[in-house]
């Protein structure tokens, strides 16, 4: 897939990802009428979130590597594509998120204001960093252990991401997606605030690089014989 195609895919998927979260919220709390403070409503919301993650996993497969999250883009590329990811793919994902938020505010001005930091900046950065670290490790291990099983890999990954999100929801929002947070922060004029940069960018990005280094240092790369099943299954 050409680099232009992958960048366009990043932008479009980022736009769609922001909208998907809003539409799930409207469906659960508006159309179905579940209260935000009721356990049943939360369960229904989490169910639709998992379904949404399956849809986006399929779209990523369809686009042959498109991403809506800078963390995933950084983790999936080797050192040779690092500069391209930082300079081109990440900005495309940020632009897609900003456009989506602007569109959402125009259509539904009463909807959402993005994540809220309920702890100190350093605790927030540590929280987002730890959550991101384990998200990246789980994704890389799934790709290594069950590379050919789309359903099983997506199911485990979705439940893991959702669980980590729930753990951090009351602290930082449990975002683990700098581009998505940037969309809301830009709309509110908070995109250059110290809180935003340290918690939602520095924490996740540093955790991603640390997770990739740790994974490659601890786990041996697959041999050619081990990679054959992956090639056949794909």
Image (spheres, rainbow, N blue to C red):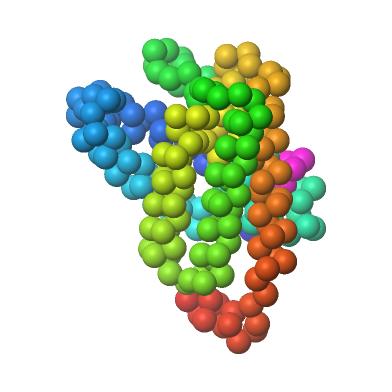
User: Which of 135/233 is in front?
Assistant: 135
Residue 11 seen in this snapshot: no
Please tell me which residue is depicted at 53% across the width and 76% down the height of the picture: 230
Residue 169 placed where, x, y %?
45, 33
Please tell me which residue is depicted at 51% across the width and 53% down the height of the picture: 60
Please tell me which residue is depicted at 36% across the width and 47% down the height of the picture: 50
Q: Which residues are magenta?
A: 85-89
Q: As drawn, which residue projects farthest toward the bottom?
A: 225
Please tell me which residue is depicted at 28% across the width and 35% down the height of the picture: 42
Residue 166 sits in quarter = top left
The kind of secondary structure the magenta stretch mainly shows is: helix
Quarter of the image containing the N terminus? bottom right
Judge left or right: residue 8 versus residue 164. right
Residue 11 sits in quarter = top right
Residue 70 placed where, x, y %?
63, 43
Magenta highlight on residue 133: no
User: Which of 92/45 is in front?
Assistant: 45
Above or below residue 141? Residue 33 is: above
Q: Count of labels shown? A: 0
User: Which of 3/25 is in front?
Assistant: 25
Residue 78 seen in this snapshot: yes
Residue 107 placed where, x, y %?
41, 17
User: Which of 28/174 is in front?
Assistant: 174
Residue 116 placed where, x, y %?
51, 22
């Amino acid at each position: 897939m050409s680099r232009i195609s992958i960048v366009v895919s990043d932008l479009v998927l980022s736009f769609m990802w922001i909208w998907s979260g809003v539409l799930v919220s409207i469906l659960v709390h508006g159309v179905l009428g579940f209260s935000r403070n009721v356990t049943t409503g939360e369960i229904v919301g989490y169910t639709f979130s998992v379904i949404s993650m399956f849809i986006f996993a399929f779209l990523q497969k369809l686009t042959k590597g498109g991403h809506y999250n800078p963390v995933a883009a950084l983790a999936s590329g080797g050192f040779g594509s690092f500069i391209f990811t930082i300079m081109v793919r990440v900005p495309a994902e940020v632009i897609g998120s900003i456009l989506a938020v602007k569109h959402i505010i125009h259509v539904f001005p009463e909807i959402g204001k993005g994540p809220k930091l309920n702890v100190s900046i350093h605790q927030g950065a540590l929280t987002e960093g730890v959550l991101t670290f384990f998200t990246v490790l789980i994704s890389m291990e799934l790709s290594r252990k069950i590379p050919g099983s789309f359903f099983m890999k997506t199911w485990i990954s979705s439940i893991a991401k959702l669980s980590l999100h729930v753990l951090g929801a009351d602290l930082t929002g449990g975002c683990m997606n700098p581009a998505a947070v940037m969309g809301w922060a830009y709309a509110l004029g908070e995109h250059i605030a110290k809180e935003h940069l340290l918690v939602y960018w520095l924490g996740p990005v540093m955790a991603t690089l640390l997770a990739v280094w740790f994974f490659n240092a601890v786990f041996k790369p697959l041999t050619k014989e081990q990679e054959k099943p992956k090639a056949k299954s794909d």
